[in-house]
Image (cartoon, helix red, strand yellow):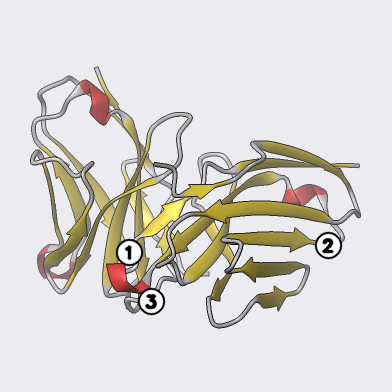
Amino acid sequence: GQQVKQSSPSLTVQEGGILILNCDYENDMFDYFAWYKKYPDNSPTLLISVRSNVDKREDGRFTVFLNKSGKHFSLHITASQPEDTAVYLCAAGASSSFSKLVFGQGTSLSVVP
Amino acid sequence: GPKVLQIPSHQIIDMGQMVTLNCDPVSNHLYFYWYKQILGQQMEFLVNFYNGKVMEKSKLFKDQFSVERPDGSYFTLKIQPTALEDSAVYFCASSFLGGVEQYFGPGTRLTVL
């Protein structure tokens, strides 16, 4: 089954706007949640992550919100820029399982002028 | 940030041949991972490796697959023999602790003909 799901395969936002990427998960054992950014033919790069003992973490323009009861986490990006154009992958893991990550299918984001 | 390198970037081989994919992880990292991404699908965990041993593997990690890291050199994924369904991009990752901040390489695109 698809344990981690990103509902939007693609998203377009205007430069300067706020965007929200969403991710739903199924496994109650997940206690680590991350967002990766990926350019074509490049490495997925860790953007921001959060453990289950907090429900929010902010790093500059990026904020991750965690809703454990709803099994949902999201990435908010403010003041979006053309260089934010990339594929965004959400991932979740359980510290009980030697830290393998389960990935969503990705959301392709385009930031247009 | 920390860099994980993968060699080669592309590999084309005939079905039944052996292939070895090489990963140069971040120098002080202790945990190593392989993930597989078939075109159009999400990245999926194959195996993780710590202290010279496989800690966990998924059902995608067939008997024809093996991993090793001899003497702190490359972390390798060997497939012998290859099958058509092994065609995919293989991503290597490493992390310092069993904590889940994994850093990824750019992937090796394997095509089995």
Residue B80 coordinates in the image, percent (x, y): 9, 35
Question: Dot 3, crowdedness within 10 Å: few (<14), some or many (≥20)?
Answer: some
Q: Which mark is residue A13?
A: none
Q: Which label sits on residue A78?
A: 2
Residue wearing tag 3: B99
The residue type indicated by label 1 comes to Pro
Q: Name the residue: 20% across, 64% down.
A: B49
Q: How many marks?
A: 3
Return the chain for callout 2: A
The vertical placement of A16 against A105, above or below, is: below
Locate residue A79 relative to residue B41 in the image: left or right: right
Mark in front: 1 vs 3: 3
Spatial CA distance of label 2 from label 3 is 28 Å
Quick one: SS at disc 3? loop
How packed mark 2 is, by other alpha carbons closer than 10 Å (few <14, some 14-19, many 20 or more), is some
Q: Which residue is mark 1?
A: B25
Q: Is A112 in front, or is B25?
A: A112
For residue B1, side relative to residue B90 (left or right): right
* Residue at disc 2, secondary structure: loop
Q: Label 1: chain?
A: B
How far is mark 1 from mark 2, CA to CA? 32 Å
**Residue B39 placement (x, y as % from top left):** 43, 29
Residue A78 position, x and y percent, is 83, 62
- Badge 1 local density, few (<14 within 10 Å), some, or many (20+)? many
Question: Mark 1 to mark 3: distance in Å?
Answer: 16 Å
The answer to which of marks 1 and 3 sits earlier in the sequence is: 1
Counting from the top left corner in percent of width and height, residue A63 is at 72, 69
Q: Do the numbered discs 1 and 2 sit on residues whose CB atoms are within 8 Å?
A: no
